[in-house]
Image (tube, rainbow, N blue to C red):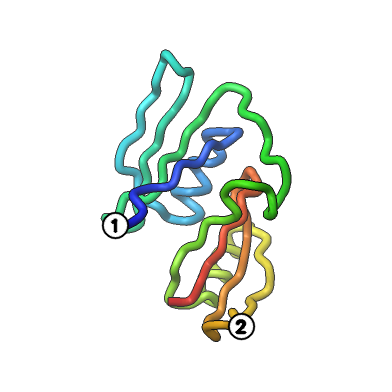
Amino acid sequence: MKIHHIAIIGSDYEVSKKFYTEILGLNIIREVYREERQSYKLDLAIGDHYVIELFSFPNPPARPSRPEACGLRHLAFSVESVHEKRDELIQKGLNCEEVRIDEFTGKEFFFTQDPDQLPLEFYEM
């Protein structure tokens, strides 16, 4: 019917939490520390829409390569203006690729990455 949520494991929970909430502006729904797993779980939303579970785990393995490793290739967010979003993220200290045009749709997009090098795409609505 639709995607319920996306789960992300950060290598440094506080750094990832700050990135997704303060840099990207996602809203915190709930934060839980699970003692038995030595793990935080942070539920995040865009507006009122639950979208990401951010986890911490002791010593998670590194991402094998970017972005053509098997598994999740990248996470894409819809935005009204890729140029405004790109400028905003650059002002917050992120390295952003140049804006490109999707050859099939004619829409503009660009990539940046989270603190663990997960590629993030911002795509024009």
Query: Residue 84 location in percent, x, y?
Result: 51, 75
Q: Quadrant of the N terminus?
A: bottom left
Query: Residue 99 location in percent, x, y?
Result: 63, 76
Give the Cα separation between the discs numbered 1 and 2: 28 Å
Check disc 2: other Cα within 10 Å, few if <14, some if 14-19, many if 20+. few
Q: Residue at x 47, y 33 (%)?
A: 55
**Secondary structure state at the residue bearing disc 2:** loop
Residue farthest top in this picture: 36
| Residue highlighted by disc 2 | 103
Check disc 1: other Cα within 10 Å, few if <14, some if 14-19, many if 20+. few
Query: Residue 30 location in percent, x, y?
Result: 31, 37
Residue farthest left in this picture: 48
From the viewer's side, name the closer residue of 90 and 106.
106
Give the amino acid type for the residue marked by disc 1 in the picture: Met
Q: Residue at x 56, y 39 (%)?
A: 15
Residue 40 shown left or right of residue 116 in the figure: left
From the viewer's side, name the closer residue of 70 and 83.
70
| Residue highlighted by disc 1 | 1
Front label number (1 vs 2): 1
